[in-house]
Image: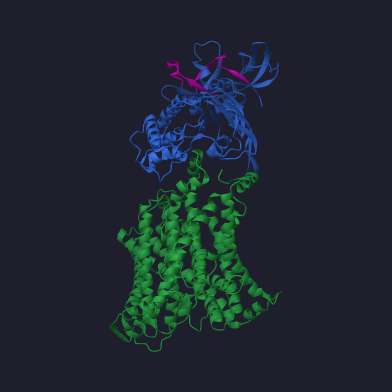
Chain colours: A blue, B green
């Protein structure tokens, strides 16, 4: 398949209102703006009802926005019908045509475009080869497994050489193992084609695995856009901190602000952290974000320094052990990897060593 | 997000953005206005307008007549009795089919026995009843030797109607009982409840909406039934549909007939509203796909099982017996008097009766494809496209279907007898009546089928670059083909068997087999009447099996069979 020049997608101030029969007018999307660079893979991530699917469907042309603009590679497509936008859309339920065999499902978009029969046969064969379904041409969708249906949906979307690839929770109907395999294949395929992709999911791990950048959505608006690392280590809000990974948000107070470092009092101790931005002031109440794996756990016996705590619960998960510890009125989640935490049963007194470089200060909203 | 609809502005933009849709919607409204709203309006005008003024005189004349008020009361009593008896029978059959672990063969046998009255002309049971219990009946005259027995009245009418219509209750209740997760009943049993207690505290409450619905369906069917009371009710037990008919054909009082049919509208409307706004909101049973089918434990004790099967067997045998009498009567010289074999009655059917047979087939042959297409088109437009007045169109398209046939027939008679639109005496008026009355089944099937087909299929096509016409032709149409064929089947069967509306619309030029059967009955030519009935049942059965074959071949995503559609 020839590689077409990549184009980007620009979404500017997109809004969509729905009339709910109980709540009245509700914003499904409110002033959503995203820039997708040519060839980039961007994920819209958020809990159900956050507006990510509505946003994607507006980009596809299945819904008309009440306000805002959508451009593909600089060309305004806001009022263009979906069938003229040149999109490749992969639906959550795959939406395979149940009355057509695999070959005709994949050939559908080419036939609509009036491509010659020989070209259709060649392109369909090539794309089925590419997704590993060569030889499946005469089968009907109902005869395929979930993973195979997913591949047909993928083949049908890319065979038309779309300008933009759009995915609406494409993996949510697959079992856990297949999901991991398919997300890698999708990512590889998209890289190989060089087509910009927008991907919707509620699964943060999936989002982190496939995306160049992630846009976290909350209640119709974008809460933060950034790389997985940005979102994980430097979340813009408590919502993002708690939605991406697991988070301990400990009440804290700013003791001293310097150019590079802030000193924070929390859990009865003082911590010196990198200064995230210039807006923190001495005396301000904040939240200290401590990821479970950035806290090291040690037996209280024979340890000096650290914060005193007590084990409340322990869950052994093989590669790691999850602890819940009580510490000065707070309950924290801690991940233990070391073999020296082996004997720490509930009730044991421990000390916590906190990695100050992995901690992050958030405003106390 | 299921409870969310698009805000207004988008809706309007799309309605005017598609010229093909605008033309289709406009044409459909024109037809609905002409063949649904106009006749109904003319009927109301005939009742309430006198020489250009609003007048209650017509209404008062009928309402003040003790005889007519009795007919109104009789209709309600008959409907209620048929509703109760038919629902009980239907429930017993449905319960036996889903809870008694019957062998497959026996379930099939029940299905066929139930199919017979459902697809026959509405008065077939009544004729069989006469052959069995009438003055010359096999039981009354032949076995018991009773002379001068009167079969006519409430009991006979009620029995014949209950036997005719209980299959509707069976078909409504059976999926409901099958859909109850047997684990729920098993759970109650495991908590220590007796089988009787499980039935009364779990099974029955879960079925209550279905039972109420079945009762309403039967009540409405009985209320609208014209043929059975015409044959069996007699002079002592007048009911509204027959009174309206006699008022018009006997007394040439079109206005009186219109008033009587309008009295019928009141209970019919109450039933319709109850169904739509009460029953439909109380369905707790959702079909999960799991747990359906045979119960994993014995829901009934052996004694109860025997009792249930005995009732089913008795009713089934009764139906088969009545139909056997009908077949027998068509083959003997004079039933009850001269039992020697003859084909003379069939000779009558194929000589002087041939015109009626030919007319019926011609009308069915026109109405069937037109009605099938109309059903799919309206169903698609209403279910999948957005335009102003969509819900109004859906409701309007159901009016002629929901109304008793007597009202529709009289409405057509009044509306199309005088200019500007004169259709009386033509085949068109009968065809239009069938299309707009029975095409509604196709509409409902199409809507139901489309609601099972995810909208993303059409979006996928659109996203791949197809225009709306291509999407409809290549994706939607193949998927709703089963609804089209099912709709065809229903229109054809009803075209062959219906009578309540079209009895007012036949003419010298165009007549129908069902009307011919009634004529034969009133002339006491029972043999030819039986022969005609056998012929109609035979044709209908052939068509049902042919359509069943087509539907199976289509391997459709949604299951729909003609029998089920006739019941709703």
Q: Is residue A302 above or below residue B86?
A: above
In the image shown, does B553 or B314 lie closer to the viewer? B553
In the displayed structure, A173 sits above or below B277; it is above
Residue B23 shows in this picture = yes
The picture places residue A138, in percent across and down from the top left corner, at 34, 41
Numbered circles on residues, count: 0
Q: Residue reaching furthest left?
A: B340
Residue B148, by quadrant, is bottom left
Residue found 40% across the figure and 46% down from its top: A99
- Residue under the point 44% across and 79% down: B518
- In the image shown, does B111 or A255 lie closer to the viewer? B111
The image shows residue B562 at horizontal and vertical percentages of: 41, 60
Could you tell me which quadrant the N terminus of chain A lies in? top left
- The magenta-colored residue range is A332-361
Residue B287 can be seen, yes or no:
no
Is residue A74 left or right of B316 when viewed as pictured? right
Residue B241, percent across and down? 53, 75
Magenta-colored stretch includes residue A151: no
In the rendered image, which quarter is residue B419 located in?
bottom right
Q: Is residue B311 shown left or right of residue B461? A: left
Q: Is residue A59 above or below residue B286?
A: above
Q: Position of residue B176 (x, y in %)?
A: 44, 57
In the image, residue B119 sits, relative to residue B387, either above or below, namely below
* Left or right of residue B539: residue B32: right
Seen from the viewer's position, the closer of residues B382 and B152 is B382
The quadrant in which the C terminus of chain A is found is: top right
The answer to which image quadrant residue B111 occupies is: bottom left
């Amino acid at each position: 398949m020839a590689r077409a020049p990549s184009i980007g997608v620009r979404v500017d101030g997109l809004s969509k209102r729905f009339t709910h029969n109980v709540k009245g007018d509700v914003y499904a999307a409110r002033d959503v703006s995203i820039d997708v660079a040519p060839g980039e893979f961007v994920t819209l991530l958020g809990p159900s009802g956050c507006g990510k699917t509505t946003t994607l469907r507006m980009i596809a042309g299945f819904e008309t926005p009440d306000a805002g603009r959508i451009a593909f590679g600089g060309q305004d497509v806001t009022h263009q019908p979906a069938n003229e936008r040149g999109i490749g859309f992969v639906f959550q339920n795959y939406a395979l045509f149940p009355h057509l065999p695999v070959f005709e499902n994949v050939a559908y978009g080419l036939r609509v475009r009036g491509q010659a029969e020989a070209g259709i046969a060649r392109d369909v064969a090539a794309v089925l080869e590419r997704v590993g379904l060569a030889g499946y041409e005469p089968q009907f969708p109902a005869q395929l497994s979930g993973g195979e249906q997913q591949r047909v949906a993928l083949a049908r979307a890319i065979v038309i050489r779309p300008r933009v690839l759009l995915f609406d929770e494409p993996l949510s109907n697959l079992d856990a193992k297949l999901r991991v395999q398919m997300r890698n294949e999708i990512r590889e395929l998209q890289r190989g084609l060089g087509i910009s992709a927008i991907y919707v999911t509620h699964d943060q791990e999936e989002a982190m695995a496939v995306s160049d950048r992630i846009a976290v959505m909350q209640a119709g608006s974008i809460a933060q856009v950034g790389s997985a690392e940005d979102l994980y280590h430097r979340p813009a809000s408590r919502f993002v901190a708690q939605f991406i990974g697991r988070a301990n948000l400990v009440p804290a107070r700013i003791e001293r602000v310097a150019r590079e470092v802030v000193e924070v009092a929390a859990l009865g101790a003082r911590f010196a952290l990198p200064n995230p931005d210039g807006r923190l002031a001495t005396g301000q109440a904040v939240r200290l974000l401590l990821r479970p794996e950035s806290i090291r756990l040690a037996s209280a016996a024979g340890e000096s320094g650290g914060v005193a705590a007590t084990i409340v619960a322990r869950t052994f998960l093989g590669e790691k052990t999850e602890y819940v510890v009580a510490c000065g009125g707070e309950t924290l989640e801690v991940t233990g990897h070391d073999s020296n935490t082996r004997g720490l049963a509930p009730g044991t007194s421990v000390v916590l060593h906190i990695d100050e470089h992995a901690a992050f200060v958030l405003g106390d909203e | 997000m299921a409870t969310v609809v698009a805000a207004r502005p988008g809706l309007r933009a799309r309605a005017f953005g598609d010229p093909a849709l605008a033309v289709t919607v406009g044409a459909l409204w024109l037809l609905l206005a002409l063949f649904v709203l106009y006749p109904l309006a003319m009927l109301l005008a005939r009742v309430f307008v006198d020489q250009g003024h609003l007048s209650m005189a017509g209404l008062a004349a009928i309402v003040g007549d003790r005889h007519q008020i009795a007919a109104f009361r009789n209709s309600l009593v008959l409907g209620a009795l048929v509703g109760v008896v038919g629902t009980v029978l239907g429930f017993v059959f449905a319960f036996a089919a889903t809870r008694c672990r019957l062998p497959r063969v026996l379930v099939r046998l029940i299905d066929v026995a139930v199919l017979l009255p459902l697809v026959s002309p509405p008065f077939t049971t009544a004729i069989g009843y006469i052959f069995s219990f009438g003055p010359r009946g096999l039981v009354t005259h032949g076995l018991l030797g009773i002379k001068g027995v009167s079969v006519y009245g409430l009991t006979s009418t009620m029995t014949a109607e209950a036997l005719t219509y209980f299959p509707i209750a069976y078909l409504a209740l059976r999926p409901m009982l099958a859909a109850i997760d047997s684990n729920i009943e098993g759970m109650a049993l495991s908590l220590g409840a007796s089988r009787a207690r499980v039935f009364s505290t779990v099974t029955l409450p879960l079925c209550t909406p279905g039972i109420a619905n079945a009762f309403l369906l039967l009540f409405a069917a009985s209320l609208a039934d014209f043929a059975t009371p015409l044959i069996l009710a007699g002079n002592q037990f007048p009911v509204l549909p027959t009174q309206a008919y006699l008022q018009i054909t006997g007394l040439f009082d079109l206005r009186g007939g219109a008033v009587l049919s309008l009295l019928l509208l009141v209970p019919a409307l109450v039933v319709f509203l109850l169904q739509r706004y009460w029953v439909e909101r109380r369905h707790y049973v959702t079909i999960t796909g799991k747990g359906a089918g045979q119960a994993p434990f014995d829901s009934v004790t052996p004694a109860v099982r025997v009792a249930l099967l005995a009732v089913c067997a008795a009713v089934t045998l009764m139906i088969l017996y009545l139909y056997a009498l009908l077949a027998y009567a068509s083959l003997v010289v004079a039933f009850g008097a001269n039992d020697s074999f003859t084909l003379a009655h069939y000779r009558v059917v194929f000589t002087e009766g041939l015109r009626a047979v030919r007319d019926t087939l011609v009308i069915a042959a026109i109405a069937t494809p037109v009605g099938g297409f109309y059903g799919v088109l309206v169903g698609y437009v209403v279910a999948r496209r957005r335009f102003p007045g969509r819900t109004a169109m859906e409701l309007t398209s159901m009016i002629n279907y929901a109304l008793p046939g007597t009202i529709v027939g009289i409405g057509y008679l009044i509306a199309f007898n005088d200019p500007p639109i004169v259709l009386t005496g033509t085949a068109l008026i009968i065809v239009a009546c069938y299309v707009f009355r029975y095409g509604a089944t196709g509409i409902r099937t199409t809507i139901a089928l489309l609601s099972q087909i995810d909208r993303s299929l059409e979006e996928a096509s659109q996203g791949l670059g197809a225009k709306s016409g291509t999407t409809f032709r290549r994706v939607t149409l193949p998927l709703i083909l089963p609804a089209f064929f099912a709709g065809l089947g229903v229109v054809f069967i009803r075209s062959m068997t219906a009578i309540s509306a079209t009895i007012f619309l036949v003419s010298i030029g165009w007549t129908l087999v069902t009307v011919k059967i009634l004529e034969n009955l009133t002339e006491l030519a029972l043999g030819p009447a039986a022969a005609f009935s056998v012929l109609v049942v035979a044709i209908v059965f052939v068509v049902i099996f042919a359509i069943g074959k087509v539907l199976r071949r289509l391997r459709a995503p949604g299951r729909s069979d003609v029998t089920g559609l006739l019941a709703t």
